[in-house]
Amino acid sequence: MNQIPFMQTWIDEELIQEVTDTLRSGWITTGPKAKRFREAILNYTQASECVLLSSATTGLELALRFYGIQSGDEVLVPAYSYAASANVILHLGATPVFVDLSDDDFNITASKISEKINEKTKAIISVDFGGMPVDYDGIKQIIESFRPIFKPHHEIQSQLGKILFISDAAHSFGAKYQGKVLSSIADFTVFSFHAVKNLTTGEGGAILISSEIEKLGAKTFLDLNSLHGQDKDAYTKLTQGFVYDIVVPGYKCNLSDLHAAVGLAQLRKYDFFLERRRAIYAQYTSLLSEIEELTLPKEKNGDRETNHHLYPILLDKSFSRNQFIEALSKKGIFANVHFKPIPLMSAYRKLGYSQKDCAYASEIYEKEISLPIYPQLDEENIKFISSCIQEILGGNECKR
Ligand SMILES: *Cc1c(COP(=O)(O)O)cnc(C)c1O
C-alpha cells in the first residue's frame, strides 16, 4: 500500500547541487552562502534588517535577552503553540503568562492579550498558527494603549518605553499581511527553517528587525550574541586578519553555509511551493466542505492570508479525534495534531500551570487534526484522503 506521510521535504537535484557546491568550495561554516541567503531573505520579505540563526528558538531567546528580560518579568505567550514559544521565557528566568484562544480562530486576539497585561508585562510573543498572521495592527494598538503603565528596569526598555512585540513566525514565512509578504511589523519577527516548515534549511532560523528596534542596536546585539560575542566572524577573520576580540560573553547559534545552501535552493522554488500548497488547500476545502462533522480552516481573515503551512480541521465532539487519526493511519494516511496546549505539558504542570490557563485551547486541541499538505501531494492523493475521511465518518468505502 502506498503511504501518505504527514510531511515530506522537497530535495531535488538542484538542492543537492547547491550543497555539493558548498562542500567542494571547502567553506562549510558561516560565510559566502549565508551572506547570499540572508540577502535573499531580505529581498523576499522586503525587510530592512535580518540575522540568520541556527533555529527560531534561539531567535526568540536572543530577542528576550536584548530586552533585558529577567526574573520577575512576565511575558505573554499563546497557550496554543509549540513549547519553544514558552520555553525561552523560562530560560531567562521570567514568567510565561498564557493567553488562551477565543472562538474565532487558532490565533490569540488583541482583546485576549489585553486581559493579561499588567505592570510586570515586558514582552508579548505572538504565534502565526498554521501560517495565518495574527492581527499585528490590533496587537500594536494594545501595546500602545498600555504605554502609561509600562515600568522599565533596563536601558533598552526605557528607550523603547513599551511592551516588546516578538512575533513567533515559525509557521508564516511568505504569508500575506495587508496584501504584502509578511515582513517586520512586530519589533522582532522570527522564522523557523526547521525540516517540517514551509521553507527549510534542515535546521535554521532568521530574525527580522524593525527599523525602530534597529535604532537601539539590535542587529549588532544579535550578530555578536549568535557568535560568542566575537567582533569578527570566521570568514572576516580569514579574509581580513586573525586579530579579534570578545566584546560580550555571547552564545553560539549562527547558521552554517551548508544549511544556507539548502535554504538558497529552497527559496528559489518557494513561490512554486506556495502555489502547490494553495492548490491543495483549495482542493481539500472543496472536497470536505459538505461534511457536517468537520469545521474547515479559513484561508483568509480580513487582510490576512495564510501561507498554507497547515490544513487544520476540527472534528465534531461526538467522534473521537484519536480514533479518527488511527483509522486514517490504517489507510496509510498520516495526520498530526497541532498542538497540545503548553500548560498541559508535564514540565509546565510541575510549575503550577493547568487547564485553567487554556480552557478554550484545550477544547480546540481535543478536536484538531492536521491533514498532510506539501508540494509533492497530487490531486489523486487529496481525493483519496478526502474520500477516506468520508468513509470514516460513515460514508462509502474509499478506494484509490
Ligand atoms: C517549529 C516551531 C518553533 C521552533 O522552531 P525551531 O527552528 O525548531 O527552533 C517555534 N514556534 C513554533 C510555533 C513552531 O512551530
Image (cartoon, rainbow, N blue to C red):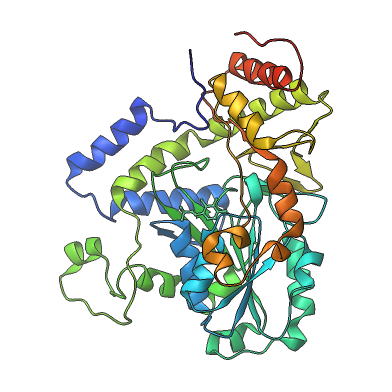
**Quadrant for the C terminus in the image:** top right
In this orientation, which residue lies closer to the viewer: 257 or 200? 200
Horizontal side of residue 172 vs 243, given as left or right: right
Residue at the image position 41 percent from the left and 43 percent from the top: 263
Q: Is residue 123 above or below residue 275?
A: below
Residue at the image position 34 percent from the left and 47 percent from the top: 259
Q: Position of residue 343 (x, y in %)?
A: 62, 62
Q: Is residue 25 above or below residue 249?
A: above
Q: Is residue 219 visible?
A: yes
Q: Is residue 184 visible?
A: no
Q: Position of residue 60 (x, y in %)?
A: 51, 65
Which quadrant of the view contains residue 342? bottom right
In this orientation, which residue lies closer to the viewer: 38 or 29? 29
In the rendered picture of this protein, how many numbered marks are placed on residues?
A: 0
Which quadrant of the view contains residue 127? bottom right
Residue at the image position 53 percent from the left and 20 percent from the top: 332
Residue at the image position 66 percent from the left and 89 percent from the top: 151
Q: Position of residue 387 (x, y in %)?
A: 69, 16
Q: Position of residue 81 (x, y in %)?
A: 61, 55
Q: Is residue 271 above or below residue 354?
A: above
In this orientation, which residue lies closer to the viewer: 393 or 278? 393
